[in-house]
Amino acid sequence: MKYISTRGNAPELSFEEAMLTGLARDGGLYVPESIPTLSAEEIAGLAGKSYEEAAFVVMRPFVGDAFTDEEFKGIIARAYANFRHDARAPLVQLAPNHYLLELFHGPTLAFKDFAMQLIGQLFQFSLARRNERVTIVGATSGDTGSAAIEAFRGLDNVDVFILFPHGRVSDIQRKQMTTPEDANVHALALDGDFDDCQAKLKDMFNDFDFRDGVKLAGVNSINWARVLAQVVYYFTSAVSLGAPYRKVSFTVPTGNFGDIFAGYIAKKMGLPIDRLVIATNQNDILHRTMETGAYTKEGVTPSISPSMDIQVSSNFERALFDAYGRDGGAVAQLMEELKDGSFAISQGAMETLREHFDSGRASEEETNATIASAFTATSEVLCPHSAVGVKVANAYLGEVPMVTLATAHPAKFPDAVEAAMGARPALPPHMADMMDKDERVTRVPNDLGALEALIKERIAQR
Ligand SMILES: *Cc1c(COP(=O)(O)O)cnc(C)c1O
């Protein structure tokens, strides 16, 4: 299996190379040159299998000869061993034809653990075999950072630097990033918003001297291996609701378009997905794009679902690449236009996008009301991101079963949940002491040179 860039101007890579590289050298994102499919029999065969067994079947065709079957099974087993639910991604019922996929039973209580724990094990295996070191730099709106730190802390061949927007993540999210004591973990609070963090990260990748000098690796949702890990739970949940013999729809709380893009890949692989609904909060660039065909950046307005406070949705580039008939030149052109704040999507490409995706938006008031009403109706406590999903999904309920992805545990956002429903969700017992631990964090300016200097200095000290 070969991987190609969405901008058509970077070397083709293997799965392992694409995983270790992250962003392509032409600024694009790696995608498989073709999408393998599973037959209806193979999909039906996932019924009754463990999450790990299903993960092997779904991901195997994408990794090529990077690992033997036994090696890959071992990597998957270690990745999900720290989850606190035997089903890994359990499905609960909210209403007659509406289900919630609980993706928050991993070590940092958010769905990002599904991808990050796998990536940690993949990196460890590959780097040890190659006898190489890398520097991982990640930008986070809150949950990616802690998930990355949890996945890479203490590993010999990796330093992990996480950039988060100073003052814009929840206390628990910050504590999860600043309290690990491992010497290879570096939490950096940047003076700016998440889009600034993401922009600095891209700038570092485009500074080839720096990139090669520190052996920069990316684990943001632009990393293909992360998207791939997330494809699995679309299969496991759909199969438990009757796929491949019955269609299933999904609503996905969306920021960087990674999680929902994984659903699109599942559909391309042959899973009978009816609707894929993009759910945004008030930072609704994706919803506006689906309505108008114009992708136009506006400022980010902080919300109670901070992990979706995003205006530049990186993985949307992968969907555009397909919608433009895999024309890398066309995508590169759009991304050039975006430097001035906006691009218009061609009519043909919009038709393709609308064939696969619906969209909706939830205001802050609607999100609060949904947390309260879901608790009254079902006793389920939703985090604000999951509530955005449930609110948007409610408009799409019908004959086809709807699965809404619950992307974080409510206890990660206790203030927002308490304000909405009057009770404060408790952290699981194994994390209860986190709020009292000492923090280790470096405040950094929104300046590329200063950041690069700091990272080089820290690596030299190790
Ligand atoms: C990251 C995140 C999202 C958005 O996921 P994308 O893959 O970026 O679309 C939604 N909810 C939570 C809790 C998250 O951490």
Image (cartoon, rainbow, N blue to C red):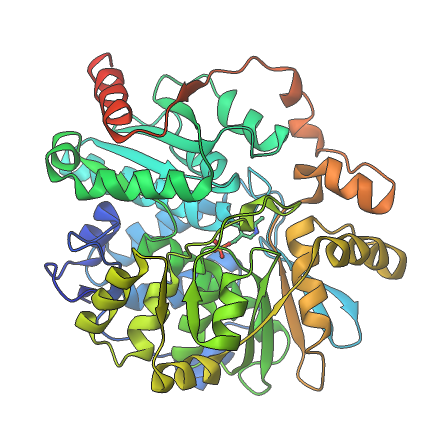
On the question of residue 45 being in view, the answer is no
Q: Quadrant of the N terminus?
A: bottom left
- Residue 30 position, x and y percent, is 24, 60
Residue 152 higher or lower than 228, as above or below: above
Q: Residue at x 71, y 76 (%)?
A: 395
Q: Determine whether, in the image, residue 435 is placed left or right of residue 2.
A: right
- Residue 11 position, x and y percent, is 10, 59
> Which one is in front, 193 or 249?
193
Q: Residue at x 32, y 60 (%)?
A: 338
- Residue 326 position, x and y percent, is 24, 76
Q: Residue at x 67, y 59 (%)?
A: 388
Q: Determine whether, in the image, residue 416 is placed left or right of residue 182.
A: right
Q: Quadrant of the C terminus?
A: top left
- Residue 292 position, x and y percent, is 49, 76
Question: For residue 248, what is the image quadrant?
Answer: bottom right
Question: For residue 249, what is the image quadrant?
Answer: bottom right
Residue 418 higher or lower than 153, as above or below: below
Q: Tally the marks.
A: 0
Taking the view exactly as shown, the residue that stands out farthest to the front is 340
Residue 367 higher or lower than 451, as above or below: below
> Which one is in front, 342 or 322?
342
